[in-house]
Amino acid sequence: MSNEAIFQMGQKALDSQPFSQLIGAKLASYKDGVVELEIPVREELFQQNKFVHGGVLSYAADNALTFAGGSALGPNVLTSEYKINYLQPAIGEKIIARARVISAGKRQAVCQCDVFLVYEGEETLCATALGTIAAISSEKANKEK
Amino acid sequence: MSNEAIFQMGQKALDSQPFSQLIGAKLASYKDGVVELEIPVREELFQQNKFVHGGVLSYAADNALTFAGGSALGPNVLTSEYKINYLQPAIGEKIIARARVISAGKRQAVCQCDVFLVYEGEETLCATALGTIAAISSEKANKEK
Amino acid sequence: MSNEAIFQMGQKALDSQPFSQLIGAKLASYKDGVVELEIPVREELFQQNKFVHGGVLSYAADNALTFAGGSALGPNVLTSEYKINYLQPAIGEKIIARARVISAGKRQAVCQCDVFLVYEGEETLCATALGTIAAISSEKANKEK
Amino acid sequence: MSNEAIFQMGQKALDSQPFSQLIGAKLASYKDGVVELEIPVREELFQQNKFVHGGVLSYAADNALTFAGGSALGPNVLTSEYKINYLQPAIGEKIIARARVISAGKRQAVCQCDVFLVYEGEETLCATALGTIAAISSEKANKEK
């Protein structure tokens, strides 16, 4: 698939996910094997200390990992598992999750994702994640539609 | 702390998290060392196949892990890291995340969480998570307020 | 497969692993879905403070997870990934790793493992792990032989 | 600390670990923030298919992560937890684990490690790991000596 086709595939998936709409996520770019997912920060995404809630960073990492996996495995993929380490309080105007494939076979891909907060133009790495993306058999994927 | 005090501490934290309000999470119970967090399922929490989005299960696991950790470490805690395995498509009317402490020291606790979907009264285990909760020094916690 | 057949399968795998021989691991039991792997503690397994080295606990968890997965998926399996949390300094005469399947499909199983140290007859939970075991296609498994 | 001092600290720790001697690990280098740990491959480190046993890769990742953490936190450190994904069968003459700090505070550091097998001069990435290293209070560290 071309980079453009992969981007379109990811954006279409995002657009059809009500939860991604609720969060306000959009695909920003796909190039050189790196998927970039963006979320504008708004008060509804905060925890009690006015930082972005960890659950939002987890969502961003999880979704970006899935898209990175999809770039290697095709559109019918899901996240099997991932681990996330929170590194810094998440303060800023925008969340950027950047994910890439580390290693891919036919049925699964291991992907890595860094989650940044942009504050006054500066990026801070706030979380890092590592996970496995699995291809769903197309038969099963059709049944699920 | 009494079980009731721990429950109140957790509910108060949830009530002050705008993102938890957006998700619709509430603390259901705290007894015998098990924290139970519930989220009614609604369409806004879906991914493209009308399953609950993995990000919602991650949020539920992350928050329930934090509350379990807080039951051992006190109110000023945060999730340092966790891993989640998705096990089954998340279909049902209600999400229940049950978390408990596996091992706790003074500064951190290792906690475990199972996430269930309730469908017509039957529970299905849809995800399982393992993570580390850290106490924030009260000095730092005050600054963050 | 019968419990006895699963036990034999695991013991045979262990016996054919030079590294497991170097560590001194043996399968102790398989019943009620729980695999039990044992390692007698000796000085060669220590780190600098005369505790059992974390790498030995990791080995024990990894191998016990694989055997648990094999009980559901058959003999041609491998660990895809796992996470381990170290909980307590590992002091004692014997290591026991107990693993079980949490959820299994046809191609992979998610398994959980607790690693204990036995000291004067008392067990202490020293590490806990969560991981994914994958079936290798028998074609590939034959090629690997 | 100078790079040389950090290297000496790590080598000294390795030399005092009987299990690292049993495995045959040595510190190869420390520069630009990257710790490199090497293990010559020998038959004793194999699993049943003549690949290096996953437990050896886990040991390598765990130890390299600890040393990376030690470069930021000082000599009294331990691995709290890590996750490892196995990517390729481990075939070759030498194992190289390369670890670096992603983010460090005063009490803990999040570190990343790639594990390579060298076969006829070519490196293959066989596993990747992500984990948390914690500083032990010097009081506790002294007691443990």
Image (spheres, coloured by chain):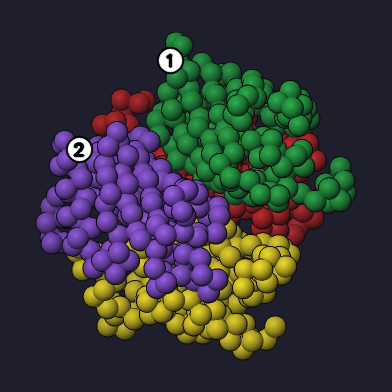
Chain colours: A red, B green, C purple, D yellow
Residue type at mark 1 is Glu
Q: Secondary structure at mark 1?
A: strand
| Residue occupying the far front of the picture | C120
Note whether residue D78 is visible. Answer: yes
- Tag of residue C3: 2
For image coordinates 49% across by 82% down, the residue present is D15
> Does residue D98 sit above or below A11 in this rendering?
below
Mark count: 2
Query: Which image quarter holds the N terminus of chain D?
Result: bottom right
Q: Is residue C145 left or right of residue C18?
A: left
For image coordinates 39% across by 30% down, the residue present is B88
Disc 1 crowd, CA 10 A, few/some/many (<14, 14-19, 20+):
few
Disc 2 crowd, CA 10 A, few/some/many (<14, 14-19, 20+):
some
For image coordinates 37% across by 45% down, the residue present is C98
**In front: B51, or A82?**
A82
Image location (x, y in percent) of residue B84: 49, 42
**In front: C118, or D69?**
C118
- Tag of residue A5: none
- Tag of residue B122: 1
Image location (x, y in percent) of residue A6: 43, 48
Q: Secondary structure at mark 2?
A: helix
Verify CB contact (< 8 Å) between mark 2 and mark 1: no
Note whether residue D122 is visible. Answer: no
> Can you tell which of label 2 and label 1 is closer to the viewer?
2
Image location (x, y in percent) of residue A115: 62, 52
| Residue occupying the far bottom of the picture | D4
Residue type at mark 2 is Asn
Query: Which image quarter holds the C terminus of chain D?
Result: bottom right
Q: Which of the 4 quarters of the picture holds residue A40?
A: top right
Q: Is residue D93 left or right of residue A35?
A: left
Q: Chain of mark 1?
A: B
- Do dots 2 and 1 share one subunit? no
